[in-house]
Image (cartoon, coloured by chain):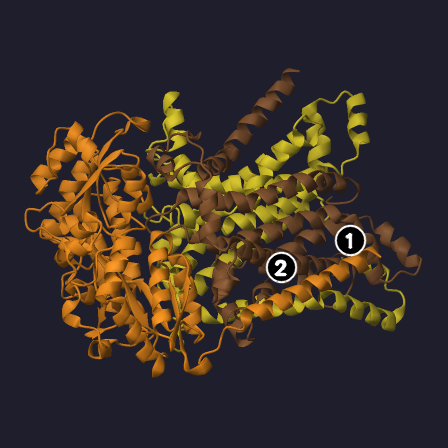
Chain colours: A orange, B brown, C yellow
Amino acid sequence: MDLRRKLTVFAALATLGAAAACGGSGSSGDKSGGTVTLSFWNGFTGGDRPGVEHLVDEFNKSHPKIHVNMQIMPWDVFYQKLLPAYGAGKGPDMTAMSSNQVAQYAAKRVFQPLDDAFSTGLDKSKIVPGALQARQYAGKQYGLPANFTPLLLYYNKKLFKQAGIAAPPANWDEWIADLKKLTKGKGPGGKPAQYGLTMGTHETVEGIPILLAGQGGGVIADDGKTVTLDGPQSIQAMTTWTNLVRTNHVMPVGTSGADADKLMQSGDAAMEINGPWLTSSLEQSKIDYGLAMVPAGPAAQTTLSDSVQFSLGSRATGAKKKAAEEFFSYWNSRDSQIYFANTTGFPPTRTDIGASDLKNPNVAVFAKYAPKAVPFLPGQTKFAQMQSEVIDPGFEKILNGQGDPATVLKQSAGQLRTLLSGS
Amino acid sequence: MLRRIGLYAGLVVAVAVILLPVVWMVFASVKPEADITGNPAQLLPEHVTTQNYREVTRQIPFARQFLNSVIFAGGVTVCSLVFNSMTAFALARLDFPGKRALFVAVILFLMIPYQVTLIPIYQIVAKLGLMNTFPGLIIPRATNAFGIFFLRQFFLGIPRSLDEAARIDGAGDWRIYARIILPLSKPALLTIALFDFMFNWNDLLWPLIFTTSTKMETLPAGLALFMGQHVSQYGVVMAGATLTTVPIVIAFLFVQRKFIQGIATTGLK
Amino acid sequence: MRRSGVRARGGLTLRARRSLSAYGFIAPSVIILGVFLAWPMIWSLRTSFYDASQFAPPTFVGLSNYRKLFADATFRGDLVNTLVYAAVVTPIAVGLALVFALMLHRRLRGRSFFRAAIFLPAVLSFGVMGIAWDFVLDPNIGVLPRWLQHVGLSLGNGVNDPSWAMAYVMFVGVWKNAGFYMVMYLAGLSTIPNDFYEAAAIDGAGPWARFRHITWPLLSNTTLFVFVIAAIASLQAFDQIFVMTHGGPFFKTETLVYLVYRTGFKDFEFGYASAVAWVLVLLVFVISLVQNFYFGRRQVKY
């Protein structure tokens, strides 16, 4: 009797599950009533989500013949899902992903070139140049910007005032002097209670290459082939900053991007190099902050960009391709970009949106420096490997004092050359 | 007496360490975001707010995702309890050609990390046309090596005299399985059910990979939306996490006495 | 399983009927395991001999993935990390579980609470708990380092310190699993008849002698089972590493499963990832055989 009752419950549950499943699965209609459905996956979680959802909703409303079916998921799930999905021919029509990743997929012919979009409505001349540069592979445009931002120097105004510093540093000499002044106190484990600088060295946007570039060095030259990571300027820059970190403790070692942000949010770090997403967090934590261009190095004043870009799966042809092009134009239109900038804090992808259109003055600062930002290692088909297996671990080794800059950078450069020759 | 105090002291310290992140989670869920990140060294909340809880229910379809989670995790748990106990029974009590091979296979299946099988499973689910359906989510997990291994071990501990006696009375395999083994293994079944349920209840990756519609999303997928690439709404995430955990803790407190004490008569030996 | 020959005395037909009935019991599991585990395993074994990216037809490369693997310093490092992790976490988690079980087996005020608290990590989501541990353990601003600072203890650079990161990952691994093993030990303890202890008490045996001569031997089956489960779980450590360190700093906490994930899903080298996975499977298999043999020799029925 007991078992029979259990089996009945089980059968009922199974039926319920099956019924629910049938109810949930009827969403594959590709062309119901002449509508083109575009599946669109991305990782716009967190603060980006509301703005993105609103823009997609508006697009669907204003384009009755196109339906963008968007699924948002965390980026790491997104990448784990993309691989089997495209492998089984079930990948989405559109994706948005970090510009760094696109070449890797483009090289596998998962995506199609998007150069046609420029002739069907998208005005190339109005887009921030770095935003287009970021997503090229083999001379073709495989991505169109969903967003594009420079990384800038955040500084805590209160801590600056306490230290008697009036303005953000303009060059390395001022910067280094300020960092030493702003690093003080005794925190846990004999470390400073307050750091001059915080910067994530893994799982985040790259900060150290900006420092290398300030000295005239870098990681890989603009030609995408010559490794400059072990050049004299790179080694010199790394030596300077390693000394600051290891001798003067101006920056905590080995933090992830999220941990670095926490230090800035808790008011325990005076400066951080980061993108616009930090503005809302700092405002929430009631930190009085300012924004400035990354201080000028001995050789150059430059910064890196971060960009998420749209791609189109190579199977999305014909009507789907047309619909996608329409979506890209809509997304990068003046109105959309003003809305996007004002809700997400990202600077617009266009050059014709002035400070007067932007509610938040901080967004205007990011917009101002956007043309100065260069993408990190654009077009590298082995970007993920280069970053997580060679570049980041190398930097962290040096900052942890496990090997001097010259030796480790030479080693890393050798690994990069191997990866470059293999691709 | 002194031993008793030492025992309590040890337990209290251990439990304090074990519960520290849990306590942090609950407190963070009632803190304003500014306090979580602005003053991270402070454990106790200074200002208590229900804002985070209201945000969770406002921003995601909590009820719908809760239901999806119940169907998915519940479906997997029920199916795997039935199938695993059947197979475990056969391995512990019945005799058939290929038994040893099956047991070795089960052990081998315990060892394969999901990262390697994800892609072929995806292909199969897609081929079967089960993508984006509950059967597609549930069937691949409707049995698992761990459950079989665990239950077989339990069944081996149940005295054979009980089923031999039943067999003499003319009972068949199904009757012995249903009337003797299952009732005597309630504690083990509860343990493994709780474990299976929680594993799937918390799983973010699996349901997201095999569904393509937001209507099918489960709670972890909903909560993950509050964790941005660079910036997370920690308070809201913790509020959601607390909401999903509380029912389970209550359930555990409710059944734990039963499922440990009940083992006394049979169980693992 | 060896005993069953005794019962099959009804000749061939009865035996056949018995087997048929048994197949009925195993059929659902066998079908599902066959389709969703056995085939994927064969697939991955096959893939390990190919250069496969998921996007282009794979090319057969023979043993080249395996050769590459043993020449790869990162693989060797990860193999060592995995073995060290398992060698530390398995006995600590099982030992703690036994200690907790011995403490909570007796009557005690608040026993349900203590049991639930210790078991709780087993049912919590790592995604969320990783964030919580991150906050609590943050070497600069975390609750725990700040508290310890008051009593003069230092956690250094915590989880970001290359020499200590593994310890943190191990700690969270133990934290996660000890409670589950405790429940199994509690179950095991409750099968030991009380008269054994009463008899021992009459003989004047102290607590240690009682543990040594009654509890421990009678728990040996539980111990074997828990050890096998714990060893398999720790050889597959991934979740907390994924959440807390991503294998860093510079691969110091990277395990073989993490390497499988990284090479497969980030570098698109599925052939290589499969080869790593199969080395891991063989490793786990050999270790559990050794465990089985070791415990088996000590006269324990298993």
Q: Residues within 10 Å of mark 1 (few under 14, many from 20)?
A: many
Residue located at (30% from left, 72% from top): A327
Amino acid beneath label 1: Leu
Say which element carries label 1: helix
* Residue B14: image location, x then y, percent: 54, 30
Which image quadrant for residue A239?
A: top left
* Residue C101: image location, x then y, percent: 65, 34
Residue located at (33% from left, 55% from top): A48
Q: Is residue C78 above or below residue C29?
A: above
Q: Nearer the viewer, residue C57 or C83?
A: C57
Side of A345 relative to C227 (left or right):
left
Tag 2 subunit: B
Side of B110 relative to C217 (left or right):
left
The quarter of the picture where the N terminus of chain B appears is top right
Residue located at (61% from left, 19% from top): B5
Q: Which mark is residue B182?
A: 1
Q: Which residue is mark 2?
A: B76
Say which element carries label 2: helix
Report the Cα–Cα distance between label 2 and label 1.
Answer: 19 Å
Q: Nearer the viewer, residue C203 or A315?
A: A315
Tag 1 subunit: B
Of mark 2 and mark 1, the one earlier in the sequence is 2
